[in-house]
């Protein structure tokens, strides 16, 4: 693998490909596995509208003073110090990757990092131990000014150490793996925790994130039964091409564009659109081998189709909402609806509006997400319901 330079773009680092010695120690194997998982789980995480905010629930109200930028546009502490350290270490690692083993080595880079770099990553351990909500001065951040350049550098350093392993005494090279193993464990825990606590609406790639958002209002749509099951669900990412998936999507939905997709195909549940997300789209962007010949064509197809399907769902909901509103208005004019007439409706709506917005028996949501626009920054944040499933 060619040396990877320090990332300055918002694209997460590519999934690493390690060449492990056949007699690698178990600890080394676990480090490789952890970094492989970190790289894969962050590969397709995308910022929405450039960035978004996560807030902390405090006592009885949301507090705007405790917002944390998850996809920052500039380096802030403690990430700024770590990124500066990396800029110093990268030239040394470049030499280690290109020179003979008699010159600067990965082991020497680790010795330097132990004094000048690893101590500045202690905040990752603090966050992983559950202190990220007590210490408001630090937060888990994504992107080129967050965790991405740290992961990129650590992956390169680990690859170099494994490459050098056969040229050094085992006692010399085993020691650096201790720090790398701890960092891999901490970072993986933080990535997994972030994905579990955050709706996929806020980090899936464009098109797919729009579909995740559109499908949340499932009350508008029929739940597909086993007889309604989409035929595309029976295909396999491994065995079927993008062309075959395209043909089946056309068969199930009537076409690939919002204008062609039929209203009758808008069915949710495990046999419908949610099944398409869970069985094919999410596994492809989360787990599927990116070197597989089907990966890129399928990702392109799913992102484009998901965006078109999201538009169709959104238009359908708008039309359906207008019809509901028109029907309610017509009934209110003569009180002919079987709901007790205007007086009873007025009383019922008054009672409904007086209810508290959230049951006291339900725990408050930990996260909320608001727009990054200046206009909405001053508004009260919109909570993400605690009963939403995070995909």
Image: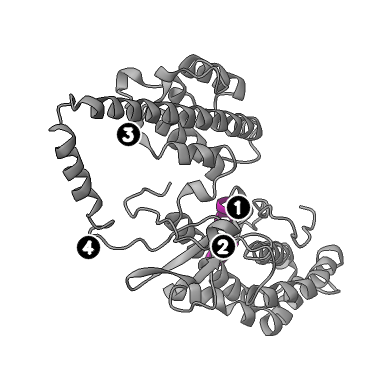
Comparing marks 3 and 1, which lies closer to the viewer?
3
Q: How many marks?
A: 4
Q: Can you identify the residue that label 3 sits on?
A: 219
Which one is in front, 166 or 12?
Answer: 12
**Label 3: element kind:** helix
Q: How far across and down, in percent of the image, does residue 178 sit?
A: 57, 75
Q: How is the image coloured?
A: one colour
Comparing marks 2 and 3, which lies closer to the viewer?
3
**Label 2: element kind:** loop
Q: Is residue 236 left or right of residue 337?
A: right
Image position of 189 with respect to 168: above or below: above
Sooner in the amino-acid sequence: mark 3 or mark 1: 1
Q: CA distance from mark 3 to mark 1?
A: 28 Å
> In the current view of this chain or complex, which residue is farthest to the bottom?
115
Which one is in front, 355 or 89?
Answer: 355
Image position of 150 with respect to 389: above or below: below
Q: How far across and down, in percent of the image, does residue 386 sit?
A: 33, 55
Q: CA distance from mark 1 to mark 2?
A: 9 Å
Q: CA distance from mark 2 to mark 3?
A: 31 Å
Q: Which mark is residue 360?
A: 4
Q: Is residue 221 visible in the rendered structure shown here?
A: no
Q: CA distance from mark 4 to mark 1?
A: 33 Å
**Label 1: element kind:** loop
């Amino acid at each position: 693998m060619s040396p990877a330079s320090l990332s300055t773009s918002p694209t997460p680092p590519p999934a690493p490909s390690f060449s492990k010695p056949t007699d690698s120690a178990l600890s080394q194997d676990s480090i490789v596995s952890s970094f492989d998982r970190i790289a894969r789980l962050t590969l397709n995480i995308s910022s929405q509208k450039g960035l978004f905010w996560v807030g902390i629930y405090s006592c009885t109200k949301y507090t705007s003073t405790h917002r944390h930028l998850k996809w920052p546009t500039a380096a802030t502490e403690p990430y700024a110090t770590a990124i500066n350290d990396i800029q110093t270490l990268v030239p040394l690692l470049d030499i280690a990757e290109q020179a003979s083993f008699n010159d600067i080595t990965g082991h020497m880079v680790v010795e330097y990092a132990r004094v000048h770099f690893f101590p500045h990553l202690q905040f990752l351990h603090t966050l992983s131990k559950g202190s990220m909500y007590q210490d408001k001065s630090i937060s888990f951040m994504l992107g080129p000014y967050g965790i991405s350049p740290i992961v990129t550098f650590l992956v390169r350093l680990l690859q170099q150490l494994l490459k050098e392993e056969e040229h050094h005494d085992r006692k010399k090279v085993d020691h650096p793996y201790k720090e790398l193993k701890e960092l891999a464990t901490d970072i993986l825990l933080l990535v997994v925790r972030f994905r579990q606590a955050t709706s996929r609406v806020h980090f899936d790639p464009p098109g797919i994130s729009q579909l995740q958002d559109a499908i949340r209002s499932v009350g508008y749509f029929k739940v597909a039964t086993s007889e309604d099951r989409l035929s595309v669900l029976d295909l396999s990412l491994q065995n079927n091409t993008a062309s075959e998936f395209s043909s089946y999507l056309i068969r199930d939905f009537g076409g690939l564009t919002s204008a062609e997709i039929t209203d009758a195909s808008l069915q949710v549940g495990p046999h419908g659109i949610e099944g398409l997300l869970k069985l094919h789209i999410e596994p492809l962007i989360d787990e599927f081998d990116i070197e597989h010949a089907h990966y890129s064509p399928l990702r392109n197809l799913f992102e484009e189709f998901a965006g078109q399907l999201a538009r169709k769902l959104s238009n359908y909901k708008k039309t359906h909402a207008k019809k509901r509103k028109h029907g309610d208005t017509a009934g209110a004019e003569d009180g002919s609806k079987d709901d007790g007439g205007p007086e009873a409706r007025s009383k019922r709506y008054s009672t409904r509006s007086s209810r508290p917005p959230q049951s006291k028996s339900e725990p408050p949501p930990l996260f909320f997400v608001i727009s990054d626009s200046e206009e909405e920054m001053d508004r009260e944040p919109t909570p993400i319901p605690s009963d939403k499933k995070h995909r």
